[in-house]
């Protein structure tokens, strides 16, 4: 285990290890630990901790803004690199590289969980919707592999947002408009946010389960897209700008928490939670990106690099089986069970990163290199 940690964290030739931003590592590490520890304590610890359930929402929202920030930067670079000759081939390259990053581990774990649950936990039927991220397209997903709801939102965003931008690009090119693509990029992001706000206003009850259907949370990554545009336009180069952005983001996230906890569901005012929290997490991401850190801790980089594995393994792969195994025993509801869950989840995540994620990332870079010039 120690050797795996050392190799993952310090292998300079690793695809993931190169060109990392430590601020984004902190954001990714915090996001996954918030979700991970909240799920662990909520499901395995008998003592009640007030408002702990809200931590899972905050962690996932931070993930959404981080994803939007990262893919937004990639798309801005892609459209800037091919201002006059962008084609669906370039969009396909973006999709292929994204899907090599996210799909292999998801599909492998889905089929492993099917086998494990049917043999030892509870019967689960194969659902083809999981194969196309349709399990929460218009309603909350089934209980099995429930954490996949956030992947459904992200994967549909990865598919749709580049198509919307490409449509804007074609309109600009067809009508000979001189406006830069950045203008359309922001308009697309704002349009997504506005449409989703309107949909939720007409469906205020969507606060149930945190409103986790794709059609009602399609704006989840849009706030990160705008943060990416702000970053690319270098609007936060001024001294102390990162600190102001970080402080403003924390304040907005706190306000969103108050809205979530204090304002009853199924009211119009409760819908303020989504834009307030989305804006707050996006500001935190961009603030961390620009913050200069004098000390860097390898453990943060390590957790960041295996965060995707932790997210997909900790609940369905560790917490639920442990809860089933220890039910009615002296271990049930103890803090020691939470410690075992943490250790086991991190160990399995490090292993899956090494034997699944890293090999597929190497294949991706070998078979589908990113465009680094005009081709």
Image (tube, grey):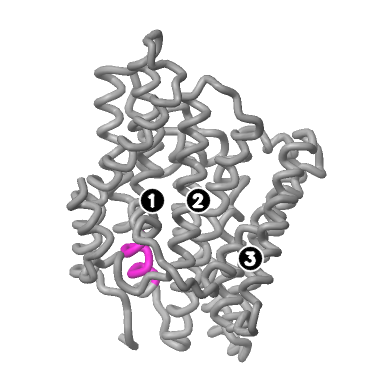
Residue 246 can be seen, yes or no:
yes
Are dots 2 and 1 in contact, CB under 8 Å? yes
Q: Label 3: which residue? A: 246
Q: Decide: few, some or many residues near mark 1? Use Cα within 10 Å; few <14, some 14-19, many ≥20.
A: many
Earlier-in-chain disc, 1 versus 3: 3
Q: Secondary structure at mark 3?
A: helix
Query: Residue 316: x percent and y percent?
Result: 38, 31
**x 33%, y 56%: residue:** 302
Q: Is residue 282 left or right of residue 124?
A: right
**x 26%, y 51%: residue:** 353
Earlier-in-chain disc, 3 versus 2: 2
Q: Label 1: which residue? A: 307
Are dots 1 and 3 in contact, CB under 8 Å? no
Q: Secondary structure at mark 1?
A: helix
Q: Label 2: which residue? A: 31
- Residue nearest the observer in this picture, 168 or 101: 101
Quarter where residue 223 is shown: bottom right
Are dots 3 and 2 in contact, CB under 8 Å? no
Query: Residue 293: x percent and y percent?
Result: 48, 71
The span picked out in magenta is 91-98
Quarter where residue 183 is shown: bottom right
Q: Decide: few, some or many residues near mark 2? Use Cα within 10 Å; few <14, some 14-19, many ≥20.
A: many
Q: Residue furthest front?
A: 295
C-alpha distance separating marks 2 and 1: 9 Å
Q: In which quadrant is the C terminus drawn?
A: bottom left
Main SS, magenta region, reads helix
**x 54%, y 47%: residue:** 59
Q: Secondary structure at mark 2?
A: helix
- Residue nearest the observer in this picture, 139 or 250: 250
């Amino acid at each position: 285990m120690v050797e795996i940690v050392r190799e993952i964290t310090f292998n300079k030739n690793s695809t993931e290890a190169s060109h990392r931003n430590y601020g984004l590592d902190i954001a990714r590490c915090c996001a996954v630990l918030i979700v991970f520890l909240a799920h662990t304590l909520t499901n395995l610890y008998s003592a009640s901790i007030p408002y702990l359930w809200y931590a899972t929402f905050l962690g996932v929202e931070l993930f959404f803004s981080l994803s939007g920030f990262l893919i937004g930067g990639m798309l801005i670079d892609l459209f800037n690199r091919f201002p006059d000759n962008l084609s669906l081939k370039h969009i396909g390259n973006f999709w292929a590289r994204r899907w090599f990053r996210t799909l292999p581990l998801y599909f492998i774990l889905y089929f492993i969980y099917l086998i494990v649950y049917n043999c030892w936990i509870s019967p689960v039927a194969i659902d083809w919707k999981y194969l196309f991220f349709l399990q929460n397209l218009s309603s909350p997903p089934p209980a099995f592999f429930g954490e996949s709801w956030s992947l459904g939102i992200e994967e549909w965003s990865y598919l749709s947002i580049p198509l919307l931008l490409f449509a804007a690009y074609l309109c600009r090119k067809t009508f000979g408009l001189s406006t830069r693509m950045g203008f359309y990029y922001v308009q697309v992001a704002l349009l997504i946010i506005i449409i989703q706000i309107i949909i939720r206003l007409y469906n205020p009850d969507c606060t149930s389960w945190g409103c986790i259907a794709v059609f009602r949370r399609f704006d989840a990554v849009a706030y990160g897209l705008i943060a990416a545009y702000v970053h690319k336009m270098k609007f936060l180069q001024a001294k102390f700008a990162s600190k102001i952005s970080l402080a403003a983001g924390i304040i907005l996230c706190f306000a969103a928490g108050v809205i979530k906890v204090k304002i009853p569901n199924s009211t119009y005012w409760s819908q303020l939670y989504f834009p307030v929290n989305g804006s707050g997490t996006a500001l935190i991401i961009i603030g961390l990106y620009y913050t200069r850190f004098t000390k860097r801790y390898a453990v943060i980089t390590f957790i960041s690099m295996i965060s995707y594995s932790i997210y997909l393994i900790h609940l369905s792969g560790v917490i639920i089986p442990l809860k089933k195994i220890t039910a009615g025993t002296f271990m049930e509801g103890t803090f020691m069970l939470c410690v075992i869950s943490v250790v086991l989840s991190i160990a399995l995540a490090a292993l899956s990163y090494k034997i699944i994620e890293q090999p597929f990332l190497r294949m991706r870079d070998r078979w589908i290199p990113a465009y680094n010039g005009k081709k």
